[in-house]
Image: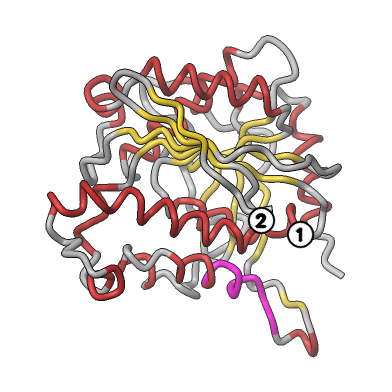
Amino acid sequence: MRPFLLAILGLFFSITIVPRAVAQDGPSVLIVTAHPDDDASFAATIHRITHELDGTADLVLITDGAGGYRFSTFAEDIYGLELTNQEVAEKHLPAIRKKELMAGGAIIGLRDYVFLDQPDKGKTFDADAVMENEWDVELVARVLDRVLAEGDYDFVFTMIPHPTTHAHHKAASIFALEAVNRMTEDRPVVLAGGSLDTFPPESFEFRMLDGHPLTTLSSEHGPWGFNRNTKLGLDDRLNYNIIRNWLIAEHKSQGTMQTYMSLGDSWETYWLYEMNGTDAAEAVQTLFDAVLDIE
């Protein structure tokens, strides 16, 4: 059945939802990201979950992605639009990037999408300023609460809110943590994900984003990792970089994304947030024991 879009209109915003498909029996994951190409950070792990573990993965996208116009030079011929012009991009790029996201999502097995269309004004580092001045905080919180309440997820994947990363990445992770923290029962385990070139990490020192104690990472458990260089197929000639590269290739409006293909950062690494409690580590270990069980 072809997916279709259901638009729910408000006074000053729109939310687009792709309706839920039939549930599966494996682990269920909700990815909360800021930009349409952020799912590349989890591509191999999600592919394993959806294709080998009979699991599901849904995605909440917070921004409209319009700020990505600066590197759209090569995509102008593909889409027949002057996408490096900010005014043109603000009008057309959000729809383009949604299509690119869903094309890549089909490769890694994403099931449902929720688009919140919050402003993407380009790269900055102040997450608090974004949350206070750019995004509709009440809307984002309300939708995340609803998605989590209805989704019955086992895990929530976020990007690691390191101080040096994009403010939108940090803000999206904070919103996800706050939403899970508001839940009173059946809370999913929230993980912080990122790509590294070695595992275990040799020089990773992040523990908490200042002013946001929910971002504190566990010092007792984890991290866990999946290597995209893991071999499979005839004569072990394939690996999971292929999956990530295919996903990246769909994001043609984002020229810089293409430069990340098959780079050395091959470990998709996941840390446990301390807010989950110590019992959550067992669930994460069970998940990654299954993810790593390559035949």
Residue 71 visible (yes or no) = yes
Which residue is under mark 2?
109
Which residue is under mark 1?
51
| The residue stretch that appears in magenta | 238-245
Was residue 240 drawn as part of the magenta stretch in this picture?
yes
Q: Are there few (<14), some (14-19), or many (20+) residues within 10 Å of tag 1?
A: few
Of residues 275 and 69, the one drawn nearer to the viewer in this rendering: 69
The residue shown at (67%, 42%) is 222
Q: Is residue 89 left or right of residue 45?
A: left
Amino acid type of the residue tagged 1 in the rendering: His
Q: Is residue 233 left or right of residue 75?
A: right
The residue shown at (22%, 57%) is 69
Q: Earlier in the sequence, mark 1 or mark 2?
A: 1
Q: Is residue 182 left or right of residue 256?
A: right
- The CA distance from mark 1 to mark 2 is 7 Å
In the figure, residue 276 lies in which quadrant? top right
Q: Main secondary structure of the magenta part?
A: helix
Rendered-image quadrant of the C terminus: bottom right
Estimate the x, y position of residue 72 in percent, counting from the top left. Answer: 24, 65
Q: How many marks?
A: 2
In the figure, residue 108 lies in which quadrant? bottom right
Q: Are there few (<14), some (14-19), or many (20+) residues within 10 Å of tag 2?
A: many
The residue shown at (46%, 25%) is 175
